[in-house]
Image: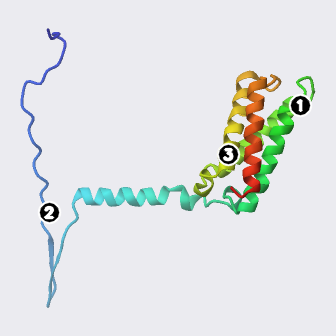
């Protein structure tokens, strides 16, 4: 049974009137008659929206700097090896070490910049080294975000991260 507060349509929907083409403007000079079609409102608005979008797009307002793009394969290999070393050093630190919090902060900064730089590179997404390194960084970062910078990694998680880092390093050496 329908509720009395439910709104139900009581009349048929009316169709909208068709869009009428506007009359072209005719200009006459001494020797020629020119007919200029007037643009419709819809055409004008779509043109204006496209122009506004192209002017406000960040592509020309903020051109990408060379540091924001992955310049070469050698750069990727070098930076990935740097991240691999930082991951290994950080997760192998003693939990009572006074420098563990700063090492985790440095690892987080390095890994965030690595991910931000290489995540958009279509050529790297299919590489084994990228996939395994991304997974290891995600596991390490997730652990330290959830449990704090001084919390030790569980043995299983630590072993999995070290295994992923090792396979990423082997794949880098093979050019994958």
The answer to which of 139 and 37 lies nearer the viewer is: 139
From the viewer's perspective, tell me whether residue 153 is left or right of residue 138. right
Q: Residue at x 76, y 41 (%)?
A: 165
The answer to which of 27 and 91 lies nearer the viewer is: 91
- Number of callouts in the render? 3
Which secondary structure, mark 2?
loop
Which secondary structure, mark 3?
helix
From the viewer's perspective, tell me whether residue 159 is left or right of residue 53. right
Q: Quadrant of residue 83?
A: top right
Mark 3, other Cα within 10 Å: few <14 / some 14–19 / many ≥20:
some
Which secondary structure, mark 1?
loop
The answer to which of 160 and 130 lies nearer the viewer is: 160
Q: Residue at x 77, y 55 (%)?
A: 173
The answer to which of 131 and 122 lies nearer the viewer is: 131
Q: Position of residue 70 (x, y in %)?
A: 68, 58
* Label 1 with label 3: CB-CB less than 8 Å: no
Please, is residue 48 above or below residue 130 in the view? below
Q: Quadrant of residue 39?
A: bottom left
The residue to which callout 2 is attached is 22
Q: Quadrant of residue 75?
A: bottom right
The residue to which callout 1 is attached is 93
Q: Quadrant of the C terminus?
A: bottom right
Which circle's residue, 3 or 2, is located before the other in the chain? Answer: 2
- In front: label 3 or label 2: 3
As drawn, the label of residue 115 is 3
């Amino acid at each position: 049974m329908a509720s009395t507060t439910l709104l139900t349509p009581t009349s048929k929907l009316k169709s909208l009137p068709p869009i009428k083409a506007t009359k072209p403007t005719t200009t006459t000079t001494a020797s020629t008659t020119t007919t200029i079609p007037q643009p419709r409102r819809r055409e004008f608005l779509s043109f204006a929206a496209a122009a506004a979008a192209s002017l406000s797009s960040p592509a020309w307002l903020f051109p990408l700097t060379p540091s924001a793009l992955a310049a070469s394969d050698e750069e990727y290999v070098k930076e990935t090896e740097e991240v691999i070393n930082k991951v290994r050093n950080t997760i192998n630190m003693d939990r009572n070490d006074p420098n563990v919090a700063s090492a985790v902060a440095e690892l987080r900064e390095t890994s965030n910049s690595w991910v931000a730089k290489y995540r958009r590179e279509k050529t790297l997404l299919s590489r084994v080294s990228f996939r395994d390194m991304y997974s290891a960084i995600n596991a390490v970062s997730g652990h330290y975000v959830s449990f704090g910078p001084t919390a030790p990694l569980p043995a299983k998680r630590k072993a999995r991260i070290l295994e992923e880092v090792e396979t990423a390093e082997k794949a880098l050496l093979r050019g994958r």
